[in-house]
Image (tube, helix red, strand yellow):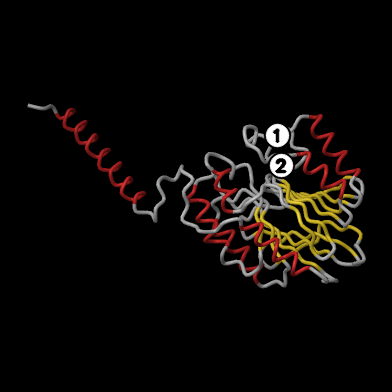
Amino acid sequence: MRSKKEGFMRFGRMMTIWVLAALFFLLAGCGGVDSPFGSQTKTSLRSHNQKTIRTLVAQGTGKTGLIRIGLLADSHQNYKGLEEAIEHLNRLPLDFVIHLGDFTNIGLNVEFDAFLRTVSKLRHPYVALIGNHDAIGAGIPMYEQIFGDFNPSFSYAGRRILLYNSNSLEFENHEGYDPGWAARELADATEPTYLFQHVNYDNKTHFTDDEIASFEAMMRSAPDLRFALNGHLHVGTHGGLGSIRLATIPRSEGGQYAILELDPAKDSLSFCEGSQCQEVAVGPGSGI
């Protein structure tokens, strides 16, 4: 006759089998997604950034006057906060929106799909950088398939927009982290230039002192770099490097976002929560 302990152990094993079986059938029925750790997603979106950039380049041709760019960062799995920020961005007259990365926690395909479902509510064109969290596991090939190149750049209404992949650690064994690309883009720019990246260039966890000094020198020597903006740190900060305005965009929690206004008279950055915005950084205008 089995002891009570043996009975509990047998029951525990049976429960484990049933849980694993249920999980298998749940995943097998999720629209073809094989596993949350795989690279298979539900979305049919492909090369999103490149397609959006082509539209923006055409839209910006001949445009003069005020440009307004909405900025999001580090939404992770905080879809409620992201939705709140999107609701407010949708009420504003914006040219486009940039998400500065970390729209997932650990680069799972289900997180990519959840982000895409949420951001689809945005009524403005948007592009998204890859964050260090998005580059975990199968995140790198998923991002490349869905969004495209890791380092795109384009001109919009006489301004140069650089979207730089600054995730040095996560791309150690992958192509796509390319400081040389940033150096060439900054040196060759002939228009007022705006640099967007996920990890701040002076982050000592990600970069050596020599790498930080080298990147700082690149920015200082750029013909007309106006703003260098990043995410990653979650808390909004702002400062300067000579005439270059530096800022960290706050995470989306609580409906936070930022607005970058590029006006002929001045450039300005505002941090926002809900409908309340506060100007935190100002630079000279481009006269365009």
Q: Give the answer, above or below, for where 131 lies relative to 55.
A: above
Q: Give the answer, above or below, for where 88 lies relative to 32.
A: below
Distance from label 1 to label 2 (Cα)?
A: 9 Å
Residue drawn where x is 83% and y is 60% of the image: 159
* Mark 1 neighbour density, 10 Å: few (under 14) some (14–19) many (20 or more): some
Q: Regarding mark 1 in the picture, which secondary structure is present there? A: loop
Q: Quadrant of the C terminus?
A: bottom right
Mark 1 touches mark 2? (CB < 8 Å): yes
Q: Quadrant of residue 263?
A: bottom right
Q: Position of residue 58 (x, y in %)?
A: 74, 68
Q: Is residue 261 left or right of residue 15?
A: right
Q: Is residue 105 left or right of residue 34?
A: right
Q: Quadrant of the N terminus?
A: top left
Please name the amino acid that badge 1 sits on.
His
Q: Is residue 28 left or right of residue 199?
A: left
* Mark 2 neighbour density, 10 Å: few (under 14) some (14–19) many (20 or more): many
Residue drawn where x is 49% and y is 48% of the image: 109
Please name the amino acid that badge 2 sits on.
Ser
Mark found first going from the N terminus, 1 or 2: 2
Q: Nearer the viewer, residue 127 or 8?
A: 127
Q: Position of residue 102 (x, y in %)?
A: 61, 48
User: To which residue does mark 1 refer?
Assistant: 206
Q: Which label sits on residue 166?
A: 2
Q: Viewer-nearest of labels 1 and 2?
A: 2
Q: Nearer the viewer, residue 108 or 51?
A: 51
Residue drawn where x is 63% and y is 63% of the image: 85
Q: Position of residue 255 (x, y in %)?
A: 63, 60
The mark tally for this picture is 2
